Amino acid sequence: MREATLKKKILQVVYSYFLFFALVAFLVTCTTMLFVTVLSRSLEIELTGENLNTAAKLTFLNVLLLSVLFTVIDTVRRKLTTEKVTGHIVKAAEKIVKGDFGVRIAPINSLSADENYNVIIDCFNTMASELSSVETLRTDFISNVSHEMKTPLSVIQNYGKLLGAKDLSEEKRLEYAKAVTDSSRRLADMMTNILKLNRLENQKIYPVIKTYDLGEQLCESLLQFEGVWERREIEISTDIEEGVLVSADSELLSLVWNNLFSNAFKFTRDGGSVSLSVKADGEYATVKISDTGCGMTPEVGAHIFEKFYQGDTSHATEGNGLGLALVKRVVDIMRGEIGVESSVGVGTTFTVKIRRAGNGSEETL
Ligand code: ADP
C-alpha cells in the first residue's frame, strides 16, 4: 500500500518536472527560431522549412536533455550537502523526543555546506546539554526527596507498630508517640520547604516590597530563639546600627534570618555564643550572624547552598538540608549577596548584603 503511494508520488514528480522542462524547451526553441529567421533575413540567407524544422527539433531536444542533466546534478548535490545534514539533525531531534538527551551532532567541515547549518547544530547541541542538565537536576531532586522521606516514614511505621503492643507502660507510650510526632513534623517541615523552594524557583512568588527598618526585623527574628538561648545558656551579643532601612519583601527576608539564626543555635554547643551585627555599608546594609559553633571545613562550605546538602550529619534529624538553599534563593531574588567564613572548632559567620532603601533596590526587584 505504502509502496504504491510512493510510486504514484514519484510518477507525479517526474511528470511535473517533465512538463516544466518541455515548456522551457518549447519557449527556448521558439525564441531561437525567431532569432535564426531574423538573422537569416538580414544576412539574406534562404532557409527552407525543412531546415527550420530540423533546427527546431534539435534545439528542443537539446534544451530538454540539458534541463534533465542539470536537474540530476543538482539533486545529487542537494543529497550530499543539504539532505545529509538535515537527515542528521532530524535523527538527533527524534532521539531527543524519545528522551535521549546525550545526543550531539558533529559540526560539518565540508566547504560546500552552508555555514548556517553549523549555527543550527551549535544551537541544537547547547539545547541538548541544557536539557540533560535539567534532567539530571530533576532525577537528583526526586532521589533526594525519596531518600529524605524514607527515614521519617520508617520511624513512623516502626513506632506506630510498637504503640499497638499490649501492656505498654505509660512512659514507653509517651516516648513512642513523641517519636511519631517528631518524625511527622520533620516530614511536614520538609514538604513546606520543598513547596517554598519550588515556588521561589519558579518565580511564582512576587516580592511585596516595602521600606522598613532592618535592625528591628532582625531583633524580632532573634527574639524567637530566646527560649533556646536561655535554656542552653548561649550568650547573645548585638551591634545594631539604628535606622538602617531596606526596601525588600520582609516576609521573604525573615525566612533568611530565621534559617541563619536557627543554624547558628543548632550548631553551637551549650554555653557558646551567637552574635548579630547590622551596619549601613554604602549602598548596602550588611548583616553578620556569627556563632562559636562547630564550624565547617572549606569542602563542606563549598556545598552548603545546594539542595539537601547536610555537612553535619549529627544534626541531620533537626533539618533537611533545604534551609540554606532557600536562603540563597531569597537573597538572589533580592539582588543581594551572601557569603560564609568558617573554621572548624572556632565558629561560623554568615554575611548577607541587602540593598538599602533608595539605592535602586525598588527597581531591580
Ligand atoms: P540543615 O541545617 O537542615 O542541615 P541547611 O541547608 O540549613 O540544612 O545547612 C546545610 C549545612 O550547612 C548543614 O548541614 C551544616 O553542615 C552547614 N551549616 C549551616 N550553618 C552552619 C553553621 N552555623 N555552623 C556550622 N555548619 C553550618
Image (spheres, rainbow, N blue to C red):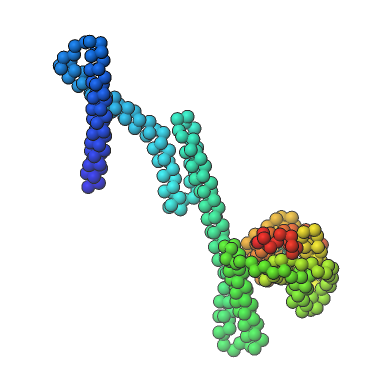
Q: Position of residue 287 (x, y in %)?
A: 78, 64
Q: Nearer the viewer, residue 92 or 49?
A: 49
Q: Nearer the viewer, residue 178 or 238?
A: 238
The answer to whether 347 is drawn above or below residue 61 in the figure is below
The answer to whether 188 is drawn above or below residue 103 in the figure is below
The quadrant of the rendering that contains the C terminus is bottom right
Q: Nearer the viewer, residue 179 or 306?
A: 306
Residue 185 visible in this rendered orientation of the protein: yes
Q: Position of residue 285 (x, y in %)?
A: 77, 63
The residue positioned 32% from the left and 27% from the top of the image is: 70
Residue 354 image-quadrant placement: bottom right
The residue positioned 54% from the left and 59% from the top of the image is: 138
Quadrant for ligand 1 reads bottom right
Q: Is residue 45 left or right of residue 172?
A: left
Residue 263 visible in this rendered orientation of the protein: no
Q: Position of residue 190 (x, y in %)?
A: 61, 70
The residue positioned 46% from the left and 34% from the top of the image is: 114
Q: Position of residue 8 (x, y in %)?
A: 22, 42
Residue 163 image-quadrant placement: bottom right
* Numbered disc total: 0
Q: Is residue 29 left or right of residue 89?
A: left
The residue positioned 67% from the left and 68% from the top of the image is: 209
The answer to whether 90 is drawn above or below residue 14 in the figure is below
